[in-house]
Image (tube, rainbow, N blue to C red):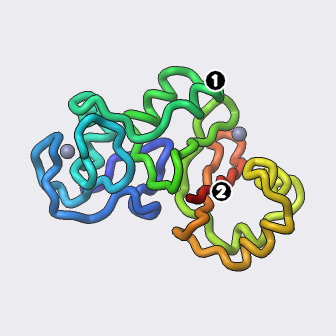
Amino acid sequence: MALPTFKYHPDPVATGSVKASDAVCRCCGQARGMIYTASVYAEESLEDSICPWCIADGSAAQKFEATFSDDIPLIEAGLPDDVIEEVTTRTPGFNSWQQETWQSCCEDACEFHGDAPRAELLELQGDALAETLAACEWDESIWTPFVQGYQPGGNPAVYKFVCRHCGKVKYVVDFT
Ligand SMILES: [Zn+2]
Ligand SMILES: [Zn+2]
């Protein structure tokens, strides 16, 4: 069964937020072969217990009054309510060391593409590099050795977001 389409998280299997599992979803009560593995903000502990279909149709968010990402960065970016709602309640979130910061661009939320590939970070230069450094408040003397030793999925982590409109790529550094 094909995964639902998530506008803001196009490949949640590749990013590790959804994995193959025979677990029963606590929302729909079915074992559908895939389970969501990343953050759930809800009263109940819902780790590894919601299927991606119940995220996509909003039923898990509704049933458990759950969200899957922090809405603060999206509110601060001034995004429309319907975009914020789609990202936080109908889109798989991701695991991060600190509270995740969903990126936005062109008055919309960006797509989440998981851990940045090391080769891309090594090639960063010019404005793209300057913007990444400004966002993480590092200078090149920290960045260059960091990228040399960077491993996707490690700590620090670097997440990749892509604008759905202008194609701009944003990298977010996250660490404990
Ligand atoms: Zn389900
Ligand atoms: Zn853009």
Going by the numbered disc 2, the residue's amino acid type is Val
Residue name at image x 80 percent, y 71 percent: 144
Residue name at image x 61 percent, y 51 percent: 161
Image location (x, y in percent) of residue 35: 26, 56
Q: Is residue 142 above or below residue 105?
A: below
Q: Which residue is mark 2?
A: 173
Secondary structure at badge 1 equals loop
Q: Nearer the viewer, mark 1 or mark 2?
A: 2
Q: Quadrant of residue 26?
A: top left
Tally of marks = 2
Left or right of residue 160: residue 98? left
Can you say which quadrant of the picture contains the C terminus?
bottom right
Can you say which quadrant of the picture contains the N terminus?
bottom left
Q: Quadrant of residue 102?
A: top right
Q: Taking the image as four quarters, which one is ligand 2 found in?
A: top right
Q: Are marks 1 and 2 in contact (CB under 8 Å)?
A: no
- Report the residue that reaches farthest toward the right: 126
Mark toward the start of the polypeptide (1 vs 2): 1
Say if disc 2 is inside 8 Å of ligand 2: no
Left or right of residue 85: residue 37? left
Image location (x, y in percent) of residue 78: 64, 23
Q: Considering depth in this image, is 136 or 21 the residue closer to the camera?
A: 136
Q: Considering depth in this image, is 78 or 31 the residue closer to the camera?
A: 78
Q: Which residue is mark 1?
A: 78
Q: Is residue 94 above or below residue 143?
A: above
Q: Considering depth in this image, is 86 or 72 the residue closer to the camera?
A: 72
Left or right of residue 133: residue 87? left
Secondary structure at badge 2 equals strand
Q: Is residue 119 above or below residue 61?
A: below
Image location (x, y in percent) of residue 100: 53, 46
Residue name at image x 25 percent, y 46 percent: 46
Image location (x, y in percent) of residue 13: 39, 61
